[in-house]
Image: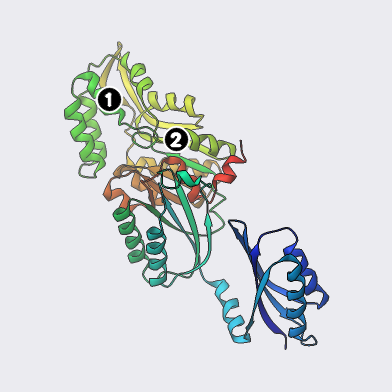
């Protein structure tokens, strides 16, 4: 029977360490069952799980490994692994795998402690931890920027709903974001991103801006807020707000469009998605005039929104055709996916309001962005502490990956 040995090598990182050790192992016809390494602040930690043939003395292998490491000024520890323990490890590979992503302006030890404790309490084992955000200068380490750490975890939470609620509670208490998603083949194979427009891509509700121009700002804003909170049916509230715009001069549409501000990270996100080959779409309960404006600005592929009815240069207080509400948004997302030959698991949806929930819930990755409490609690994922480009972290891309695209 073969001896199973865990070899752990550590010390200051330098070229040739892995080469030297594996060359020694090859002399003894050792089988490498697993291998992994990490380098943190130029300090290497290399682990090799090796099966030593029964015809070879394990002591001979460890002695020669030790000897080769002396010249490299590295150290090693050797841990025998029982057959039973190895078999248990093999059986673990069939367990579900998930990704927990911690995002914040600045990640402190307390954030890591809280997230890892919750994972442990719900029976999840952390296999790997990776920092996705870039390195920062020491003088900048206390400043608020953006940080992300990704945990690869194995197992299934004892109570998935309760686990997600606990993560949401932690995120709210500490002004951080915590995403939990299945680690499957679609995570880096998603190809279509669908955005809501108002308060998602842009930092405004366009209908409120038009209402200000029409002198009915307060009335419309109150109805908008109730609708976004989920207190009013979207289609009904939209009709009420739109009617108040009757008689508005259509010439103001351009000036309103020009003063709209993109939400943080929107431009960088869209630029990066394009470079990575994603298709993008606006599916909005807002208006096509402003969707087209953003389409030209950001290079968005498709726009679906409500067409304002204009006669004799004046807004009539109606739209052309049916109103795009939450259910219609979900239908449009499905239609887009089918047209592109994609399954829903390959689609990302991003929105902030209650009328976005239908499409957020059917997309493979549904993200509530700076959303109302009801929407955050109902969506699969949410981002509130960072900008829209924080979505790239949820897809597993690091700052280094993105920089390489430039």
At a point 68% along the width and 82% down the height, the residue shown is 4
At a point 77% along the width and 71% down the height, the residue shown is 68
The residue beneath circle 2 is 266
Q: Quadrant of residue 169?
A: bottom left
Q: Quadrant of residue 284?
A: top left
Image quadrant holding the C terminus, namely: top right
Q: Is residue 127 found left or right of 380 in the rendered image? A: right
Above or below, comparing residue 276 to residue 150 in the picture = above
**Element under disc 1:** helix
Count residues near mark 2 (Cα–Cα under 10 Å), then give few for <14, some for 14-19, many for 20+. Answer: some
Q: Quadrant of residue 294?
A: top left
Q: How far across and how far down the image is residue 220, in percent? A: 20, 29
Q: How far across and how far down the image is residue 357, in percent? A: 34, 47
Earlier in the chain: of badge 2 and badge 1, it is 1
Say whether residue 334 is visible: no
At a point 21% along the width and 25% down the height, the residue shown is 243
The residue beneath circle 1 is 209
Above or below, comparing residue 312 to residue 15 in the picture = above
């Amino acid at each position: 029977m073969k001896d199973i040995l865990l070899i752990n090598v550590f010390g200051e990182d330098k070229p040739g360490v892995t080469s030297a050790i594996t060359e020694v192992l090859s002399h003894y016809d050792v089988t490498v069952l697993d291998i992994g390494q990490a380098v943190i602040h130029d300090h290497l930690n290399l682990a090799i799980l090796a099966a030593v043939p029964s015809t070879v003395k394990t002591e001979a292998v460890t002695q020669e490994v030790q000897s080769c490491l002396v010249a490299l000024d590295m150290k090693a520890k050797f841990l025998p692994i029982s057959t039973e323990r190895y078999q248990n490890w093999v059986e673990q590979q069939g367990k579900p795998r998930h990704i927990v992503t911690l995002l914040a302006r600045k990640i402190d030890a307390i954030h890591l402690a809280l997230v890892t404790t919750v994972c442990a309490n719900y029976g999840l084992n952390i296999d790997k931890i990776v920092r996705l955000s870039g390195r920062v200068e020491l003088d900048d380490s206390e400043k608020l920027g953006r940080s992300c750490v990704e945990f690869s975890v194995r197992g299934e939470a004892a109570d998935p709903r309760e686990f997600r609620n606990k993560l949401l509670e932690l995120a709210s208490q500490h002004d951080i974001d915590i995403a939990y998603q299945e680690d499957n083949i679609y995570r880096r194979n998603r190809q279509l991103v669908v955005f809501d427009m108002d308060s998602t891509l842009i930092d405004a509700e366009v209908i409120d801006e038009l209402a200000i121009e029409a002198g009915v700002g307060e009335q419309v804003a109150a109805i908008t807020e109730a609708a976004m909170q989920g207190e009013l049916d979207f289609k009904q509230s939209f009709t009420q707000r739109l009617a108040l715009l009757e008689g508005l001069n259509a010439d103001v549409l351009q000036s309103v469009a020009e003063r709209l501000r993109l939400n943080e990270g929107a431009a960088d996100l869209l630029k990066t998605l394009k470079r990575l080959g994603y298709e993008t779409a606006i599916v909005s309960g807002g208006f096509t005039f402003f969707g087209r404006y953003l389409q030209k600005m950001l290079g968005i592929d498709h726009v679906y929104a409500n067409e304002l009815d204009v006669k004799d240069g004046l807004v009539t207080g109606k739209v052309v055709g049916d109103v795009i509400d939450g259910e219609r948004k979900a239908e449009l997302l499905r239609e887009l996916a089918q047209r592109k030959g994609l399954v829903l698991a390959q689609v990302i949806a991003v929105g902030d309001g209650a009328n976005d929930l239908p499409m957020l819930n059917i997309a493979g990755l549904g993200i509530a962005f700076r959303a109302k409490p009801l929407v955050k609690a109902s969506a699969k994922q949410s981002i509130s502490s960072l900008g829209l480009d924080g979505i790239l972290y949820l897809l597993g891309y690091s700052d280094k990956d993105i920089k390489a695209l430039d």
